[in-house]
Structures are given as structure tokens and as C-alpha cells.
Image (tube, rainbow, N blue to C red):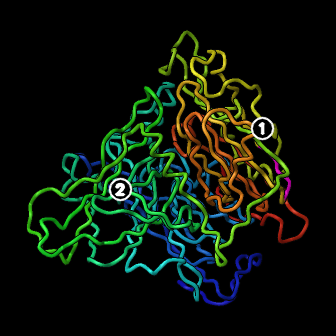
Amino acid sequence: MHLFGFVVLCGLLASPVWATTHQHDFVIEETPYSRLCDTKKILTVNGQFPGPTIKARKGDTVIVRVYNHAGKNITLHWHGVDQPRNPWSDGPEYITQCPIQPGANFTYTILFSEEEGTLWWHAHSDWDRATVHGAIIVYPRRGTTFPFPKPYKEIPIILGEWWIANVSEVIEDALRTGGDPQISDAYTINGQPGDLYDCSKPGTFKALVEHGKTYLLRVVNAAVNNELFFAIAGHRLTVVGTDASYTKPFTTDFIMITPGQTMDLLLEANQPVANSTNNRYYMAASAYSSAVNVAFDDTTTTAIVEYINGTSTSSTSPPLPYLPSFDDTDSATNFTANLRSLASKDHPVDVPQTIDERIIISVSVNEILCPNGSCAGPNGNRLAASLNNVSFTLPFIDILDAYYRNIDGVYRTGFPSEPPFYFNFTGDNLPFSLLFPRSATEVRVLEYNTSVEVVFQGTNLLAGENHPMHLHGFSFYVVGRGFGNYDKEKDPDSYNLVDPPFENTVGVPKNGWAAIRFRAANPGVWFMHCHLDRHASWGMDTVFIVKNGASPQARMLPPPSNMPPC
């Protein structure tokens, strides 16, 4: 449904005259799907896996009415959409809303502002996003176009993860025992594992291309717990965007994409087809898993790029692309270092050159003591995770409602601005005493329009690993990265304040650090967490509360009348 012209929602929010409002109905239901020789019921939206694609233009509004016909609570999140002044529709359970209960419904209002490119939506409750997710495509405003030649067609590529077991039971068992969750059985491309897995070849996704045409691949990493390398045999890829922000184009043999991230890639269908012995090429994805002695899914998912104007009748398998080794941190780092904002006249940057507040956050995997070594984690303890030695605990009602209504006892505002103690964060053989965080619901309060720098400092506690940190309500400039311990006197000298990438999810290098900057000009309650879901489930999370500004346009919108009850 398209409503052109001036739009008023609830008498509060006006869209510009060029904007459009779209409406969708999402029905959450259990649907039987067969993968890897096994059939099970999974949570879906409208019976689809992956779910429906949402399409909009820059600045549009999308209304999504969610009807929960499944047997469990659920929420949905619109990943990478800033939702200006509207945290009520952001979605993370017990952060900005209570879940939509079975048989209930809730209407989300998705406010697009500066985003342009590829984003995605997913469940933000339990590990439901394993199957409840889909792409969001934000096109340029009418009268404008891409900052690169218009591609012939676009092809969404959603990278996912599949368990034969019930995913809810996987995380429930892990939280009950304190051990590491069972690893997945396969990765998927557009819901299909591909030719290299049992019982999977008939469903393998095929991307049909014409020789001489250029295609825009909209790649989403929707995997639950794994960063991925992705490539296409016989073809190079040109990166032109990430997290719905355009980049300076660069060409690469592969990409490394973390859970939560999106990338826009141009694929030139330039392989010879006349008299060729082959007109099919595998695209493939496999894990980048940098943690030592941590189990991971080491399988490879494939799909097929097939030239429809080819003449090959060969029955041989398509060639596989080169993918770096699972522990190739150099390749992951070198790829990521190429990401820079386009920073053009039509797509300028606005990097904070000075800051009002610097927050240094240590990012750790930890343990919580169990009596008599009775848990299934290391040393008989419970696996945990923390930011600045605080392992986040979800409250019993949502933080946004408690903040808006001044309800005491739900959260505390003592999230520290730096680690409680300094040590050689990235060293080996760290003292056992450093493993144990405190558990609390701590948030950080930011004044409106503050220029904020956050430095994520990785640690080598239990196992150093690349952590994809995601901030709701904002995109941010990734101004610096490095290995080892962050030096606040020297490392800012190496920052890129000219054309840093503008992202919503940043990979903190294994045993290293990443620095981001943003202006806290979006009032509300905004979740920040690792997008490896096992780490988020263990407490690698916190919340930024951005206070209202002085003007009416700098104040959080009031809540809709039908917020789900707790």
C-alpha cells in the first residue's frame, strides 16, 4: 500500500512530501522445512525462510503489523535503521519492549532517514533470528541514483546457519548447563546449504546471469555465531557499500563479513561462454573463526552462478572459489582495511573531529563460578561474557518503559567509562582471577548531541576472538583499528578522520581494538551488543540512554498505545 504526499502517524510524526509509507503484514508461524535429510518445524514469517524482503526508498516509512501465531514470545528488530526518536519500534526484548506473546500482535513503525543500500531485519528474542530474518533494500530517493553505473539486476544473498536440532533448545541447554552451545550443522545461502551437504543438491540456490551484464549482490550475514569469508569462483567482486552506506569502490577476490553486517558488491558476468567447457561457478562461504581451541562449524555452503547464454553441456561440478583458511586473521584484516566511505559531494561524511566523551570498553569472554565445579564450562564453571567486566543481565520489564515512566529498580546507570582495572588485555597466560565479572543491568547515560568516542578493547581472557559489536539507533564512523592494547596517547594519531567507513556493526580485531565515533543526537534507549549470539546470551551487552534535547524535534516520541505487556 502506497500513500503519497504528506503523512501523519498518530498525529505526531510527519514525513516529507517525497516520502512514501509502505505496509506489510508479518505472520509468525511454525512451518515444516527439510534440510540435511531431516524435517523439522522452524519459526518463519509468512511461511518463508528466509523471510520477505522489505523494499523502500531513502526517507520512507514502513509499517509492519506482526501477528504471533507461534507458540512462543518474539520481537523483531530492523537492523541498521536508526529509527530517529522512535526506540519504541527498535525491537530487542526487555530493552525497548516486552515480547509479543503467542496470539498477540504489535505494529512496528520503521522510520528510514539517511540509510541507503542494504540492511536486514531479524528476530531479537532468544536465538529466533536463526530462521526469522530477511533483507531490507533501501533505494535512492526518486530523482537520484546509485553513485556507480546502474546494475542490470540485483541479487540478494543471505548467508545463514542451520541446526538439525531445535535452535531454541540449543541455547536453552547451553544456558542451563553453563557450557558452549552446540555448533551448527551447516551454513546456508538464501536458505539452502548447497551441493556439499547430504540431501541438499536439489535445492541449491542458483543465480542466473547473462554474459556482459553487471549485477548488484546485496549480501547479508545472518549467521548466528560465525563470521564468514565469501567468494565466487572465476570472478572478482567490487565492494561499493556496507551497512547501507556507500564506500569507495575496491575490487577483491573475497570478502569477510561479520554477523550483522551487510555488503553491496558488483559482480561482472565476464567469463567466456561461447565454446566454453563450463558456464557454472560456485559461490561459497566458510567460517572465519579466530578463537583458538573453540569449536566451530567448519563446513562450506555453496550456491551456483550460472550463465544462461552459455553453451556448455559439461556435467562436471562447477569450480570452487579460493577462500582463506578459517584462522587467517591477516586476510580478514587486510580486507577490512580497504573499507572507506565514499565521501563525495552527494554522499558526504560528517566525522566528529573532536569528542566530548571517550568510553573505553574491554570486551571479554569470562566464567562465573559454579559450586563444586558443577557446570559444563571451563574449570567446571559457567561460560559468561562482559563489557568492562559487567556481564549484562536482562531485566524483568523493558528498560525503555522503565526510563520513560521513571520506574525504579529495573536498571542502574553505573556502566563504567573505562575498564575497572587495566592489565595486559591481549597477553597470554592471564591471571585466573581476571576471569570473573559481576552480573548487573548497567547502562550508560549520554547527554543529547554529545560527540562520543567508544574504543572497544579486545581481551585474551579464555580465548581472544574477533567480536562484531553492533549499536542500535546509530551508524558510526570506524576511525581506527589496531592490534594489542589501545594507547590513548598515541593511537588517536593514526585515526582516519577523513573518510572512515560508516557502519552499524564493527569487527573488533582479535586481541586488538577498534575506535568508533558518533553524535548522540538520537534520543532514546539503544542496545549495544556483540552480534555473536552466544556472546550476547552470556552478557556481552550494555545500553546507551540518550537524553532528550531542548527542542521538540530533539525529544523522544511518545509510546504507541499498543506496546506489548510484560
Dot in front, 2 or 1: 2
User: Which residue of the protein is positioned furthest toward the right in this rendering?
Assistant: 550
**334 to the left or right of 494:** left
Q: Label 2 is placed on what type of residue?
A: Ala
Residue placed most toward the observer, 381 or 427: 427
On the image, the x and y values in percent for residue 1 come to: 53, 83
Secondary structure mostly taken by the magenta-highlighted segment of the chain: strand
Mark carried by residue 415 = 1
Residue drawn at x 70%, y 45% as measured from the top left: 397
Q: Secondary structure at mark 1?
A: loop
Percent position (x, y) of residue 33?
Answer: 30, 54
Residue 132's place in the image compared with 267, above or below, is above
User: Would you say the residues marked 2 and 1 are in contact, meaning their CB atoms lie under 8 Å apart?
Assistant: no
Q: Name the one closer to the observer, 131 or 356.
A: 356
Local packing at callout 2 (Cα closer than 10 Å; few below 14, some 14-19, many 20+) is many
Residue at 66% x, 40% y is: 394
Q: Earlier in the sequence, mark 2 or mark 1?
A: 2
The one of 295 and 559 positioned closer to us in this rendering? 295
Q: Residue 203 lies in what quarter of the image?
A: bottom left
Q: Position of residue 48 (x, y in %)?
A: 37, 63
Q: CA distance from mark 2 to mark 1?
A: 40 Å
* Residue type indicated by callout 1: Phe
**What secondary structure is found at the residue carrying circle 2?**
strand
In which quarter of the view is residue 61 placed? bottom right
According to the picture, the residue beneath numbered tag 2 turns out to be 231
Residue at the outermost top position: 372
Range of the magenta residues? 444-448
Q: Nearer the viewer, residue 565 or 489?
A: 489
- Going by the image, does 225 lie left or right of 155? right
Please state if 190 lies on the left or on the right of 421 as rendered.
Answer: left
